[in-house]
Amino acid sequence: MKHKCDETIIIIGAGIAGLAAGCYAQMNGYRTQIFEMHDRPGGLCTAWQRQGFIFDGCIHYLFGSARGQPFYQLWEELGVAGQQQFVHHDELLRVSKPDGKTLIVYSNPDRLEQHLKEISPIDRRLISDLCTGIRTFTRFDLSLLQQQPKALMQLGDWGKLARKMLPFICPLVRWGNLSAAEFAERFQDHQAIGVRLYNNETCDADRIISACDGHNTLFGLLDRQYVPREIQRYYDGHLPIHSQLQVSLGVNRDLSNEPHWTTHLLNEPVVIAGEKRYEIGVKHYCFDPSLAPPGKSVLMVVLTTNYDYWQRIYGRSIYDAEEIQESQIIIDLLDRFYPGIKNDIEFVDVATPLTYERYTGNWQGSSCGWLLTKQTLPLSIKGLPKTLPKLRNFYAIGQWVEPGGSVPVVAMSGRNIIQQICREDKQTFRSITPEK
């Protein structure tokens, strides 16, 4: 039997899940190598620079950014907490009506309750119930859903989790070697033994972890050979996918005195990408001065959109024309909310689901796997299987096995899979907090 220091793990994908898995594997004495098809790590956690503006394509909020919060320990172990400055907004967002009336969603539930009662005194009882539910839910440790690999949970563990969740149901590249490569899986006797690159170079390992797109893993790399019916049906199209259209603007105007996130309700719906829109959410990033030159700002609008709408016209001139048309509709709307902003725009960037698919390889350009809905909520608690019954030494992590995705959840997914591997090797899992 190999000593664990001789055990090798290949991780396919250098997104947050893959990088986290590499960190924890190294902490526990495994030798790791990470393969990534892009020329840089990060996966969907990315940003891009255009004419002096930086457009964030990922994080809108981050669980565990303050000491004592769920997931904070995770960020400490990965060397993030204490190394980065987190921004904690007093307001989550505002909702603005055409007549100028505004609802502010405060981060503090006491302040939120007072504000809502000022707006609608007749609903005092309902508002009290709502805010009581919010206070109750803030005491629920969200990381409980991710702290222990589901594969290691016994009946008693599920019972403990259920008891902790019960009060809340009603209110309801620090480690590893990075290689840029395109790859194909290698198998032998129904056992994953390594990866084969497109140049036919082979790299063997004792275990393979797929931290890349779930659909491509199952139906591309594995060539449908090891896909159980239970998993296959999740990809049959009946579950909603988190595909999005992102329009980012670099503007020659300082918006730092404006609310950072506002949803504007519209008098009349507008059609964008074939769908009627009754509201437009607008975000600016002036709280981070590194994203725009002095006196300038980044404005962003993100809308859910249908992948098929864009896929049908991709590769034709109509695709580029559609990007321009949809961005112009949004710019015209923004000119209502920020009079004259149209003349201050210096750069327009449009990212469709096809953009995300091209640059990250994610199925249908999804940024968080499946949408978190009533339909997928039970699945997000249970999670999808991380192993395949007929393929040994193969594991899957990331947003496609943790429905709902999000940066902390996929990072915890990487942690949990190494915890599971340590259990299989009869080794005590350990985590190390880097020295500051």
Image (cartoon, rainbow, N blue to C red):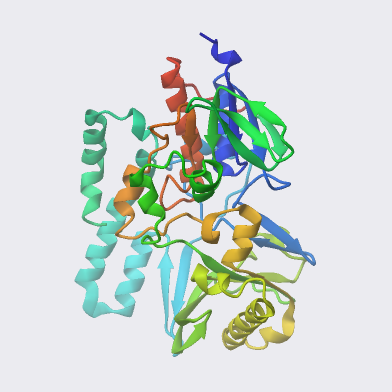
**Residue, far right:** 51
**Can I make out residue 79 in this image?**
no
Image coordinates for residue 273, horizontal then vertical, percent: 53, 79
Horizontally, residue 26 falls left or right of residue 236, namely: right
Image coordinates for residue 95, horizontal then vertical, percent: 44, 76
Q: In this view, does 17 lie above or below 168?
A: above
Q: Which residue is found at the position 50% from the left and 48% from the top?
A: 219
Q: Is residue 186 above or below residue 352?
A: above
**Residue, far top:** 1
| In-front residue for pair 253/384 | 384
**Can I make out residue 113 in this image?**
yes
Horizontally, residue 200 falls left or right of residue 1, namely: right
| In-front residue for pair 341/101 | 341
Residue 384, by quadrant, is: top left
Image coordinates for residue 294, horizontal then vertical, percent: 77, 67
Image coordinates for residue 278, horizontal then vertical, percent: 43, 82
Q: Which residue is found at the position 47% from the left and 28% from the top?
A: 190
- Count of labels in the image: 0
Q: Is residue 234 above or below residue 2?
A: below
Horizontally, residue 313 falls left or right of residue 240, namely: right
Residue 49, by quadrant, is: bottom right
Could you tell me which quadrant the C terminus lies in?
Answer: top right
| In-front residue for pair 39/112 | 39
